[in-house]
Each structure stands twice: as structure tokens, then as C-alpha cells.
Image (tube, rainbow, N blue to C red):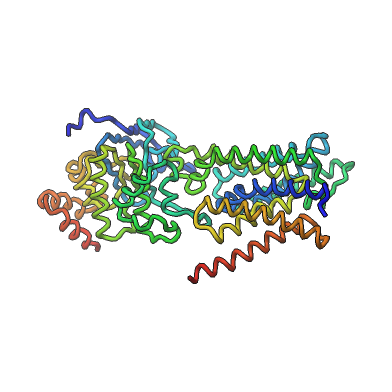
């Protein structure tokens, strides 16, 4: 697993985006390579989703450069509003953009544990179920690059762990690059190759170990955040139990 | 008693129903139901232009409607106003401009009733040709762009992110919409075309659970409305255009009954 010979899938250089005369993000640089998980973290309104949208081309960057080296992209947006005037089943939604085979659809739905919902209408799904379907749709056609904007929101706790494990597995098995936006700092620190900490601009970036020691990061997220890494480092083979303990500290 | 004029009316109505079925589904899905109203107001301008410059009405309405439709798309992108507010804005401004223009052209006498209701019983062979060739073209283009257009309808950002170019297909769709209005305005009038776009599709929504099914049922509903409406207008001597819409209304009511039953089961 040498990281040097991996193909670069996405390269964002010094990109900025402004809307209504306001900078949403400025000077973001990052790159995603094959088999690598790059995570964006940062407080609300720090430009994480905006950065993902710039990378995807939904927002046209006002400054800087964005280059994609693949067309096989899977996207799980943070918010999705599907008008319920539209009758659409899970199975129709799976082939909305790509045309995955029946097998691919079944495998993808199975991986996110929603195979039983295949013939249900999207409007009948719960928030968490819908989220799983969104992930399944994005991975069904085995994309080269996955962009996941808070992919596990609304998913129950057990499912959350399973889905993060799935994401890790996908990046290894499909050798695809993943740009992940997550609030779960523990997951970020344990499962990510590279972290970009945003707060309107790139606060700091590097491997999880480097970012956790950064002063700006500690200011943004507080002491709890920096202790996560030590937890992770000490209990390396007990990922699940530490996950739980972090979650409980929600005060 | 089946006269020639009746057969022509039937063929014209069926031709239009075939096209309005699928287009109407997209109108419902995209919440563009007021679009017919907006275009009807702008069509006034289109018809005025046609009379003034002595050009083909269908062509003139097509051009004006396309322009209005594209302005709508632009505004949707650049303002924060919701679609219905923009449609209202465009409807009233194009109506106002149309009326101002008519004021300058005092020589033109204007048949507003004809514009609203058309006269399906006065269809001639050229009209039929326009409907069937134009309609076939619209359906062909719609079939070609179906997938990206549908993806853009479900979710713009997903389509954009995964390389479907939704902007392009949204524009093509609105031009198709202007085209169906243009080819049918003279024959069936604006009231009928708006009703034909929305009512069969609304009926189909009640009884379908996937998009393809909804499109098929919408087409069937439109065809049935035309057949029932025209035959009953012959039988009861009622106005043909409104009879078609009334038939569509009855079908819609029937779909509601069925919908409730299936929910209880």
C-alpha cells in the first residue's frame, strides 16, 4: 500500500467561492487519491459542504482551480429534497443516473442493509432508511471517487458504525478515493488518511496525528477533540468501545 | 354520425393527448402547473406579434413562449424567489406588455374567446399535420433526453455532481413545453392545453407508484378524455374543448376513489 504511486482523482488548488458578495470559502487546497479517505472537518458554516460542491462542480469556483481525473463519481449530498409529487421507488432511484445491473443494485442495497426496501416508494422511507439508500445508490456502480457529505446523518447508532466500516471497506476494496465530511471526530481520526480542517479557509491539514496536535484545531474543537486521538492511539484494537464512550460525552 | 370534421377533431385531440401525457407528468413533478397560465398570458403577445408581422401564429407563439420560458429558467437560477412567484411575475408582466402592444395596434381585432378555447371542430389538414409531425418531434426529443431530464427533475445537484448537465436538459424541456403550446394553441386554445397538461397527469399520480407507470397512465387518461369529451359533445351538443376537460375531471375524480380504496387495503 505505498501511497506514492496512486492516481490522483481530484485536485483542488487554492479554490474560493463567493455568493452574494460573501466569501463562503477561500483558498482551499486538497487532493484525493485512489484508495484514500480525505475528511473535511470544521464547525457549522465553515464551508465543508461548499468545498464538496466546488469539488463536484455544482458550484463554480470563483478563484483557483479544480481538476477531476475521473468521470465515475458517486455523490451523497447533505440535504436532498425530492418532491413527493414524484412517484419513485428505491429501485428506480438506484438507476437514476448510472445504469447498474440488477446484481449491482442488490449488492449495494445489501451492503447498506436496505435490500428489503427495494420496491418501496422513496416517500415511504424513514430518514435513516433514505440515507442508506442514498449511500447504496452512490456506490452501486463502483465509482472511482465518492463524495460523502455527512453520509450517516439520521442513521441509528449501530448502523452508523456499520456504515463507517462500509465506507472504509469500499475505499480499500474498490480502491476508490473518498472525500468525506463528518462531524464524528473519532471516526475521522481513526479511519482517515488525511484531514482538512476548515473554518472559512483551511485551518490546518495533514494526517490525523498532525491535525490533532495543531493549535488552531484545538481551539476550534476544544480539549475533548484533542483527547480523541490519544484515546484512539491507546486503544487501537478497541475501536467500537471507544466509539461508544465518545458518543456518550455529549455534554 | 361521424363527419369528417369530427374525425379531424378526434385526430387532433388524440395527437395532442399523446404529447401532453408525458410532458404533463414533468410539469407536475417540477411544480410548474402555473406554467400554462403564464404561457397563456405570454401567448397573447405571441398572437399579437403574429398578426402584426403577418407570420405564422404557431411560430410566433413558439418564439415568444420560448423566450418567456428561458427568462423563467434564468430567474430561477439567479433569484431566491420560488417558482410560483416567478411564474406569476412573468404571467402578469407579459400580459401587461401584450395589452400595451395591442393598444398601439388599434387596427387588430382580437378574438379572445378563440385564443382561450380554440376551435377543435374547425381543424383542417394543415393543422393536423402540424400537430402530428410537431408532436412526434417533441416526443422523440423527450425520449432522447428522458434520463438526464428525469435525473435533473429528481435532484438537480445529484445530476450536476455526477455529470448529467441538468441545466442543458432543463432548457430543452422548457423549449419543448413552449412547442406543445405553440402547435396546439390555435386548435384547442389555452384553457384546453393547460388542462390537458395537468389533469391527466394529476389523475395518473393518484394511481401510480413509479414514474414510467405514471407517464403511461397519463397518456391513457388524456386519450380517454379526448374520446369521451368529443363524443359527449357530439351527443349533448356541448362545447367540445370544455367537454374534454370535464371528461378529464371525471377521470380524476374516479382516480381519487380508487386511491382511497387501495390505501385502506
Front-most of residues A221 and B58: B58
**Residue at screen point 81% across, 61% down:** B235
Res. B82 in view: no
Q: Is residue A29 shown above or below B240?
A: above
Q: Quick one: which residue is furthest to the front in this view?
A: B1
Q: Is residue A13 shown above or below A116?
A: above
Q: Quick one: which residue is furthest to the right in this view?
A: B107
Image quadrant assignment for residue A251? bottom left
The percent position of residue A219, horizontal first and vertical second, equals 24, 49
The percent position of residue B58, horizontal first and vertical second, equals 75, 39
Q: Quick one: which residue is furthest to the left in this view?
A: A234
Front-most of residues B159 and B244: B244
Q: Quick one: which residue is furthest to the bottom in this view?
A: B264
Front-most of residues A125 and A201: A125
Image quadrant assignment for residue A28? top left
Res. B105 in view: yes
Q: Is residue B93 shown above or below B238?
A: above
Front-most of residues B98 and A114: A114
Image quadrant assignment for residue A158? bottom left
**Residue at screen point 17% across, 52% down:** A228
The percent position of residue B108, horizontal first and vertical second, equals 87, 42
**Residue at screen point 59% across, 43% down:** B73
The percent position of residue A116, horizontal first and vertical second, equals 35, 58
Q: Quadrant of the N terminus of chain B?
A: bottom right
**Residue at screen point 75% across, 59% down:** B243
Q: Is residue A204 left or right of residue A240?
A: right
Q: Is residue B200 left or right of residue A152?
A: right
Amino acid at each position: 500500500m505505498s501511497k506514492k504511486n496512486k492516481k490522483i482523482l481530484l485536485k483542488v488548488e487554492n479554490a474560493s467561492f463567493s455568493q452574494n458578495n460573501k466569501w463562503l470559502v477561500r483558498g482551499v487546497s486538497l487532493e484525493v487519491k485512489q484508495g484514500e479517505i480525505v475528511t473535511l472537518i470544521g464547525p457549522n458554516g465553515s464551508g465543508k459542504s461548499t468545498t464538496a460542491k466546488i469539488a463536484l462542480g455544482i458550484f463554480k469556483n470563483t478563484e483557483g482551480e479544480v481538476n477531476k481525473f475521473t468521470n465515475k463519481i458517486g455523490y451523497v449530498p447533505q440535504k436532498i429534497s425530492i418532491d413527493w409529487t414524484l412517484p419513485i421507488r428505491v429501485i428506480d432511484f438506484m438507476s437514476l443516473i448510472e445504469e447498474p445491473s440488477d446484481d449491482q443494485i442488490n449488492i449495494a442495497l445489501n451492503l447498506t442493509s436496505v435490500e428489503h426496501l427495494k420496491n418501496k416508494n422513496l416517500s415511504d422511507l424513514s430518514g435513516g432508511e433514505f440515507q442508506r439508500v442514498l449511500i447504496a445508490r452512490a456506490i452501486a456502480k463502483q465509482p472511482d471517487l465518492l463524495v460523502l457529505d455527512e453520509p450517516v446523518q439520521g442513521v441509528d447508532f449501530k448502523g452508523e458504525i456499520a456504515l463507517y466500516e462500509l465506507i472504509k471497506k469500499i475505499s480499500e476494496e474498490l480502491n476508490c478515493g473518498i472525500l468525506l465530511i463528518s462531524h464524528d471526530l473519532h471516526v475521522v481520526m481513526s479511519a482517515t488518511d488525511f484531514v482538512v480542517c476548515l473554518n472559512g479557509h483551511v485551518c490546518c491539514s495533514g494526517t490525523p496525528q498532525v491535525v490533532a496536535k495543531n493549535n488552531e484545531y484545538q481551539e476550534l474543537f476544544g480539549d475533548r477533540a484533542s483527547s480523541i486521538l490519544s484515546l484512539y492511539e491507546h486503544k487501537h484494537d478497541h475501536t467500537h468501545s471507544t466509539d461508544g464512550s465518545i458518543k456518550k460525552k455529549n455534554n | 354520425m361521424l363527419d369528417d370534421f369530427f374525425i379531424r377533431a378526434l385526430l387532433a385531440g388524440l395527437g395532442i393527448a399523446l404529447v401532453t401525457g408525458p410532458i404533463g407528468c414533468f410539469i407536475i413533478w417540477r411544480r410548474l402547473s402555473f406554467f400554462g397560465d403564464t404561457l397563456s398570458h405570454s401567448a397573447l403577445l405571441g398572437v399579437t406579434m403574429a398578426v402584426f408581422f403577418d407570420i405564422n401564429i404557431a411560430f410566433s407563439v413558439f418564439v415568444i413562449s420560448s423566450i418567456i420560458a428561458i427568462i423563467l429558467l434564468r430567474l430561477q437560477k439567479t433569484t431566491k424567489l420560488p417558482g410560483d412567484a416567478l411564474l406569476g411575475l412573468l404571467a402578469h408582466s407579459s400580459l401587461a406588455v401584450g395589452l400595451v402592444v395591442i393598444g398601439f395596434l388599434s387596427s387588430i381585432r382580437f378574438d379572445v374567446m378563440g385564443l382561450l378555447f380554440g376551435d377543435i371542430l374547425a381543424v383542417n389538414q394543415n393543422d393536423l399535420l402540424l400537430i402530428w409531425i410537431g408532436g412526434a418531434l417533441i416526443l422523440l426529443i423527450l425520449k432522447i433526453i428522458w434520463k438526464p431530464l428525469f435525473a435533473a427533475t429528481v435532484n438537480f445537484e445529484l445530476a450536476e455532481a455526477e455529470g448529467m448537465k441538468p441545466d442543458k436538459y432543463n432548457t430543452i424541456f422548457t423549449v419543448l413545453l413552449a412547442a406543445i403550446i405553440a402547435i396546439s394553441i390555435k386548435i384547442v386554445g389555452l384553457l384546453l392545453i393547460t388542462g390537458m397538461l395537468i389533469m391527466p397527469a394529476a389523475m395518473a399520480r393518484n394511481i401510480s407508484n413509479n414514474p414510467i407507470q405514471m407517464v403511461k397512465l397519463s397518456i391513457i387518461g388524456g386519450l380517454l378524455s379526448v374520446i369521451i369529451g368529443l363524443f359527449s359533445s357530439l351527443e349533448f351538443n356541448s362545447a367540445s374543448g370544455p367537454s374534454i376537460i370535464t371528461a378529464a375531471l371525471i377521470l380524476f375524480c374516479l382516480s381519487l376513489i380508487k386511491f382511497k380504496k387501495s390505501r385502506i387495503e
